[in-house]
Amino acid sequence: MRRDTLVIVPTYNERENLLPLADRLMGLPVAVDLLVVDDNSPDGTGQMADDLAAKNPAVHVVHRPEKVGLGRAYCTGFAWALERGYEFVFEMDGDFSHNPADIPAFLEAMPNADLALGSRYANGIRVINWPLHRLLLSVCAARYVRLVTGMPVTDPTGGFKCFRRQALAAIGLDTIRSNGYSFQIEVTHRLWRVGLRIVEVPIIFTDRFQGTSKMSSKIVREALGMVWRLWFQNGLRRSPRRRPPP
């Protein structure tokens, strides 16, 4: 029987992480389905995901022909989830930087939220295995987003999120063109500016110990420009167009 909660994990060369991640997700005290969106990983991650799906009906796989960005992978997964009627849809990294054990805390927050956003900076900094320059970049980016847009979240570039179905439907997936960190900022801003409820869930972020980071200067530049575009899209407002319900 299909669950009402789906966890979307985009993968590119995550062979070493996929099996232990799937085990952790399937062992949670809450029932979840897993959707692997693989970008034709050269290391065979996609085939490994197919093997998992053949053995476990809670595991699903979407194969994309090439690597075209994190945002595109998530939009593919979101559309797949909406077509199948999931009520709660997670996005999370496949490298254990996001802890699967935090998922129940997100679901506990959902009665009062349309989006639960995992924050590394709510009530202090909780980041492990990052060099100081990377931490400073992330913290400064969060403040930059808030300064320009007025969006009152502590971690707008965070990629561990839980969406209510109605929130995903409100995003306008076919109009999103951003990737990387700018994708995370844009999705959250689109929900915030139309008055949907956003709750931050404190998490501990542990940078990957295996594989390589997807960070690049292109991703940073895209995010810097995206913030001003969102401000213009919101009519130069630094507040939502509609207020969330009490």
Image (cartoon, rainbow, N blue to C red):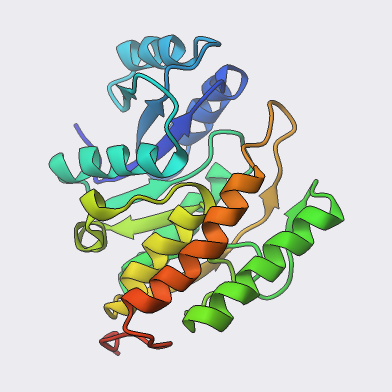
Please provide percent x and percent y for residue 57: 27, 22
In the depicted structure, whether residue 226 falls above or below residue 230:
above
- Residue lying at the far right of the rendered structure: 132
Residue at 37% x, 65% y is: 115
**On the rendered image, what quadrant is the N terminus found in?**
top left
Give residue 170's quadrant in the image. bottom left
Query: Would residue 75 be visible to someone looking at this image?
Result: yes
Please provide percent x and percent y for residue 45: 49, 15
Q: Is residue 150 left or right of residue 243?
A: right
Residue at 42% x, 15% y is: 46
Give residue 203's quadrant in the image. bottom right
Query: Would residue 98 be visible to someone looking at this image?
Result: no
Give residue 10's quadrant in the image. top left
Residue at 68% x, 76% y is: 123
Please provide percent x and percent y for residue 67: 45, 27
The residue nearer to you, when weighing 108 against 207, is: 207
In the depicted structure, whether residue 45 falls above or below residue 108:
above
**On the rendered image, what quadrant is the C terminus found in?**
bottom left
Q: Is residue 207 left or right of residue 2?
A: right
In the depicted structure, whether residue 93 falls above or below residue 223:
above
Please provide percent x and percent y for residue 143: 64, 76
Number of numbered markers: 0
The residue nearer to you, when weighing 209 against 192, is: 192
Residue at 36% x, 40% y is: 72
The residue nearer to you, when weighing 157 against 217, is: 217
In the depicted structure, whether residue 165 falls above or below residue 156:
above
Q: Is residue 195 left or right of residue 180?
A: left
